[in-house]
Amino acid sequence: MDLHLLWFLLLGVLLGGYAVLDGFDLGVGILHPFLARTDGERRVFMNAIGPTWDGNEVWLITFGGALFAAFPDAYATLFSGFYLALMAVLFALILRAVSLEFRSKLDPGAWRAFWDFLFFLGSFLAAVLLGVAGGNVVMGIPIGRNWEFTGNFLTLLRPFPILTGLLTAALMALHGASFLQMKTAGDLRKRINGAARKIYWVFLVLFLATLAWGYLKAPYLKSNFQAHPWGWAVVGAAVLVLLWHYRCLLKEKPGRAFLGSTILTLGAIFLFAFSLFPNLLISSTDQAWNMTIYNASSSQKTLATMAVIAGVGMPIVLLYTAFVYWVFRGKVQIEETSY
């Protein structure tokens, strides 16, 4: 068994799990100030994700830990080069968490309006910054001879990563709207459905622009599609799911719409990984200094030991996650102990 490939795939599973689960959390936060008109509706939005948001973020922490253990050199280069950006992501996630916990401590008024704004700001910044990080990884970053990041924070703010940041925010908003339709009813659900249809077109334009730009401006992406033509089948499937998702929105089928946005999110993660493989980080300075799953990995023994641990732990995590969502299924009901 190629343990390097196995851990590349497992990292993709962890990143995909985070994108799907915390993705709709971020989307709910992005939509919160625009669609929730009353304090009661804002509480519905927050309680839709209240029982699960903190558990969803664990997937990102696990992804970072697995990257550190399986590919420590790539972890060191990535976290040193993206230090300020990742601290900004952490700050944004903290803003969201604090907003959820503090908002309901006082009666409606300036206090709640303040935390509502921070809830939106933290969610939007986290989605955009994570997308910007992904865009930089795909397009390549300045890595020197000793795998040291030779750029600065402004190096990361290039047009393509900013585009992928906006794409990520739009996808999360669409995913969040699809989730909220399952948790709400009546006029609020119709309002969310109408907003989802508009967000859909924004996402579609950004998706096509990102796909075309990446294919034309990153030669190694083109070579991956040429070497593995089946990758185009995934792109074609994504287009079909896009069409089906919009049909679900028109028919007001919230469960199917959420399934569609989930598949789109996983498809985006797949295309991200497909674009990189077998690289982890691409050097825009010299392709000879790319960090791959083979030259930046831990020892075979470490990878094998981790594989055993993952084989035992990941099924338990998946079962527990499924159980939690089953327990908290259904429409949101506001109670005295709710957010």
Image (cartoon, grey):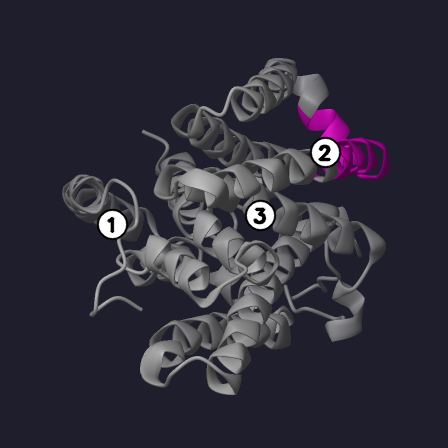
For the residue labelled by badge 2, is the local secondary structure a helix, a strand or a loop? helix
Quarter of the figure with the N terminus:
top left
Q: Answer yes or no: is residue 229 visible.
A: yes
**Residues under numbered marks 3 and 2 in contact, where contact means CB atoms less than 8 Å apart:** no
Q: On the image, numbered disc 2 is attached to which residue?
A: 201
Q: Earlier in the sequence, mark 3 or mark 1?
A: 3
Disc 1 residue crowd, few under 14, some 14–19, many 20+, Cα 10 Å: some
Look at the image and say whether residue 218 sits in the magenta stretch: yes
Q: CA distance from mark 3 to mark 1?
A: 35 Å
Q: How would you rate the neighbour count of disc 3 (Cα within 10 Å): few for under 14, some for 14-19, many for 20 or more?
A: many
- Given residues 66 and 256, the one toward you in this image is 256
What is the count of numbered marks? 3
Q: Identify the residue at horizontal 79%, vertical 67% (top origin).
A: 155
- The numbered mark at residue 164 is none
Q: Which amino acid type corresponds to the residue marked 1 in the rendered image?
A: Met
* Mark drawn on residue 173: 3
User: Residue 185: image x %, image y %?
Assistant: 39, 40
Q: Nearer the viewer, mark 1 or mark 2?
A: 2
Q: Which residues are magenta?
A: 203-224
Judge whether 228 appears above or below 186 on screen.
Answer: above
Relative to residue 93, is residue 332 depicted above or below? above
Camera-near label (3 vs 1) is 3
Instruction: Name the spot of residue 40 as percent of width and height, x first.
Output: 40, 62
Image height of 12 relative to 143, above or below: above
Q: Name the residue rendered at 43%, 39% in the picture.
A: 186
| Mark 1 vs mark 2, CA separation in Å | 42 Å
Amino acid type, label 3? Ala
Residue 71 is one of the magenta-drawn residues? no
Q: Residue at x 36, y 86 (%)?
A: 106
Disc 2 residue crowd, few under 14, some 14–19, many 20+, Cα 10 Å? some
The numbered mark at residue 306 is 1
Amino acid found under the numbered disc labelled 2? Trp
